[in-house]
Image (spheres, rainbow, N blue to C red):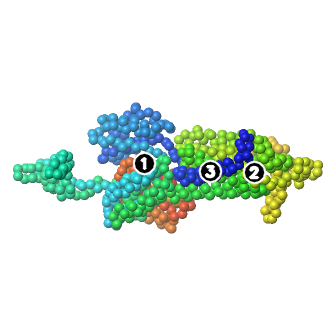
Amino acid sequence: MNAIVVTALRRPLTFVVLSIMIVLLGVMSIFKTPTDVFPNIKVPVVAAIWTYPGLLPQEFAGRITYNFELAVTTTVQNIEHMESSSYYGRSIVNIYFQPGTSVGTAEAEVSAIAQTVLLGLPPKVPAPMIVALNPSQVPVIALQMTSDKQTPSDLFKLGVIRVRPLLATVPGAIVAHPYGGMDSFVMVSLDQKQLQAHHLSAADVQAALTAQNIVLPAGDQKIDATDWMVQTNAAPESMDDIANIPVKRVGNAVIYVRDVASVYRGGHPQTNLVLVKGRQGVEMITQKGGTASTLDVVAATKALLPRLKAILPPDVHISILSDASIMVKDQIKDVVQEMITASFLTGIVVLLFLGSWRSTVIIATSIPLAILCSIIALGWAGQSINVMTLGGLALAVGILVDDATVMIENIDVHLEMGKDLETAIIDAANQIVIATFVSTTCICIVWLPLFELDGVAGYLFMPMALAIMFAMIASFILSRTLVPTMAKYLLAGHVHHPVGAPGPDEDPHGIHDSAIDIPNPHATQRPPSGFFSRFQKGFEARFTSFREGYNTILTRCVARRGAFVGIFMVLSIASMGLYFVAGRDFFPEVKSDALQMHMRAPLGTRIEVAGRIAALVDDRINQLLPGKIENIISNCGLPEGPHNQAFIPTPSIGTQDCDLTIALKNAESPVWDYRALLRKDLSKRFPGTVFTFQPAD
């Protein structure tokens, strides 16, 4: 392995250029690599979304969901497990597959069996929507639409027709159906008495409407020099046209739709409403795709806001309701700051112990280069810049200093022997190559078990292991290339005593004054003058005193090894009792700028009543936490689009449920204290209503 060191000394400019290339590629990778809070979680999941309006949940589960699940288990391969939820008029079946299963193949197999199952289901059950899910598809930005003139139904239609198609053009974005409001239709409300008086049934009216709502091609007609495209169009253009459709002729009298029904614009009963500060509106939630960057999706969505405002009516106000990129930036910034702090403190410690700014510069240069190499490798490996990878790099900062430090220290030792600089570098590198290689390999091996983790834990912690291993490998290579190159130039003025001459800590007979025989490679350097010289000398004196004190304690422990081992074992065994006392959670409790609370009123509560309760809860929360609340969004009932429940699952099962997102003004709020306060007070204030908090805020 010394050949690369010799090459570095003979061709130093080559490795300087390579180092500059690492910096450039590293900066490019930082900007190009997707940035998110957590790594991409690639759990293969396919969801089947069934709808059959009016069917009760228990009937849906028994007549549709069960039959579909049974058929899936007989034909679809590599199933890990299934989860299903049946609601009023809809059902969602999530099929989890074994790791490594092709989602495309699984989706095709589920679609095929779903079409076959339709033959054995109740009549007129529509085919299900089959979609592939990814745990990394999380909401990243939400927009709210409010108006003083438009109804919630009008806002819903604007969200579907104008806003959603434009948001869908954002690369990596998945746009959910609007929340709040309801879809509107032209309603024909039949009058039973008039139907009986005219001897008609609902089927007769339906047949008449169907017959008068036909558009058929009729070919073309050439007249003179013009070729006219002709079609038969009997579609009504207004509600008056619908009211004037003939249903039946009795003698000379014609019975029209208006005679037996009233025509108006309406819709089915509302099942979902969104309250922003107690006021109804519509919420548009955008998710990011599994491999997309949260920052990119949010930035592109924000860039579309001027266009969205231009295509909406002037009285409709659209604004950002929540923005996950703020949290992502804060999390990344915190980790980067900790990394910079760790690097700075490491440099200070190295400077104090080595006492040479030249050696410190060499070591401090290798640390960021190793980190940049790791980021480049992570980008090539398809990973993202996230809290786990940056956390791994922050952990590695203290380890990355080892290879370069050992190399520099050993070079100084060989310089003390009177060797010329290049010979000292080559001999020093040759002497420690096996030790540093084994050390680097052992550190990498320690992280290998993380690659055996399954499920979500594996996807979370494997990128952290990769980041550390890439950085360690880069650090070892840099210690054999860049460190010798920089040492050749920065240590060129190194002053040493001739071989055999006593150093400052030796008497003429070569006896060391210190209690422990540790060579001091910097003792032969010309001591710097000024404040740092005095500070460094004082630090060395105090550290020597500490070292001698530690040596005394260690000697006593070794002399009484039996008692020491006994005390150590007792404390170790006693500490195991903490396992039964400490809490357990997937993630530690952290301060946050939001709370996610679920409210469930008594079963069967109307959506309007649930909305009023949510408004009262909103007011009470503001009273309990005065000046600490930025905004409260209440999302009550089940969404109009059933696929929203597949993409964004919630505990809601009916109109009595509300999800309250409580945005806090302070990003460092002690949310656990707020949760305890709200849970205790709201339960007393609203008896019969259950309040729970989501595990992940």
Going from N to C along the chain, the mark reached first, 3 or 1, is: 3
The front one of 376 and 653 is: 376
Helix, strand or loop under label 2: helix
The front one of 240 and 475 is: 475
- Residues at marks 3 and 2, CA–CA distance in whole angstroms: 20 Å
Which residue is identified by label 2?
487
For the residue marked with disc 2, what is the amino acid?
Answer: Ala
Q: Which residue sits furthest left? A: 251
Residue at the (42%, 55%) spot, across then down:
285
- How would you rate the neighbour count of disc 3 (Cα within 10 Å): few for under 14, some for 14-19, many for 20 or more? few
Which residue is identified by label 3?
21
531 shown above or below 116: below
Question: Which of the two marks, 3 or 1, is nearer to us in this view?
Answer: 3
Which residue is identified by label 1?
647
Residue at the (76%, 57%) spot, across then down:
357
Q: Position of residue 610 (x, y in %)?
A: 38, 58
Corner quadrant of residue 265:
bottom left
